[in-house]
Image (cartoon, rainbow, N blue to C red):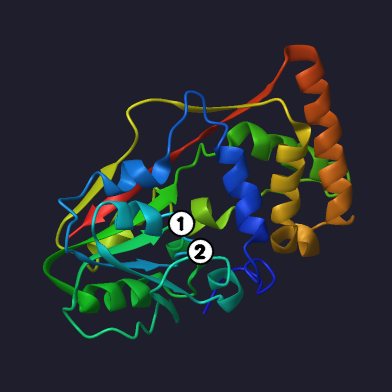
Amino acid sequence: MAESPTTQYASSSNLEARQNLWTYVSPPFLLSDWIVDLVGPWPELRVLDVGCGNGAYLGACRDRGAKVVGCDLSFGMLQAVSHNALVNADAMALPFASKSLDVVLAPHMLYEVSDVESALLEVRRVLKPGGALLAVTNGANHARSLRALIEESVRESTPGWMMHDPAIRKFSLENGASQLAAVFDSVSCNRPDRSLRVVLKDVNVVANFVASVGDRYESEIRVPWTTIVDEVRRKVLRIISEKGSFMTSADVGVFICH
């Protein structure tokens, strides 16, 4: 079962809008490559990418010689993936034999399941002794300046509104370790060794990002989400006009668990 509305991942379009914003990290930084390079060697490893989305990590695993399967609850999402081993399944009921996998990737998805502990127990079940879970998520400072603009825009009609991002509220770099430690013997957290600053000069990139999360929040506010998108667009356009760009930053990391 998923935490977000079914419309959020009915296709890959919302995810792609958010991924596009992070392509403007300066200097460039490819998160999927950084993540998979923390574990290795990959050749011949049996890998499951659970919550694979549109396949951002599948290529990185293939390039390193892994035998990787992509798994996602959304059939619509899987339709956007170019890969020959895909499974439409729930993270809390994985269709794999016990102790059959070397690595499980869980990239930005544990905060989407209805029961994190159940999903983690399922991951532990399918991992071989000595196998590793790589659980990717965000920290409290992720996209802080952009979230502040969204909150400011919403509060004009809905005072006191907070953007409760599930990646920060439910399973984050701050609260994820304790949840993982309840299931795994060893949990370590890795973060990039440099600031991941995003420099944006195209207001449409920001507007598309904001539009992509509308189905999560529109029921909480007093105006249509399109009104918020337009207001954020106006504010970002002003910032770009005055300063040359709008900047935010990524706060991201990965837990490696055994």
Asked whether residue 191 is in view, the answer is yes
Q: Residue at x 16, y 63 (%)?
A: 44
Q: Tell me the residue that label 2 is attached to.
A: 53
User: Which corner quadrant of the image does residue 98 belong to?
Assistant: bottom left
Give the image location of residue 198, x and y in percent: 57, 29
Dot 1 amino acid type: His
Tag 1 secondary structure: loop
Q: Earlier in the sequence, mark 1 or mark 2?
A: 2
C-alpha distance separating marks 1 and 2: 9 Å
- Disc 1 + disc 2, Cβ < 8 Å: yes
Dot 2 amino acid type: Gly
Tag 2 secondary structure: loop
Give the image location of residue 256, x and y in percent: 24, 53
Give the image location of residue 208, x and y in percent: 74, 46
User: Which corner quadrant of the image does residue 189 belong to?
Assistant: top left
Task: Out of 218 and 206, give the one closest to the viewer.
Answer: 206
Drawn side of residue 100 relative to residue 140, left or right: left
> On screen, 22 above or below 95?
above
Q: Tell me the residue that label 1 is attached to.
A: 108
Q: Which label is found at residue 217?
A: none
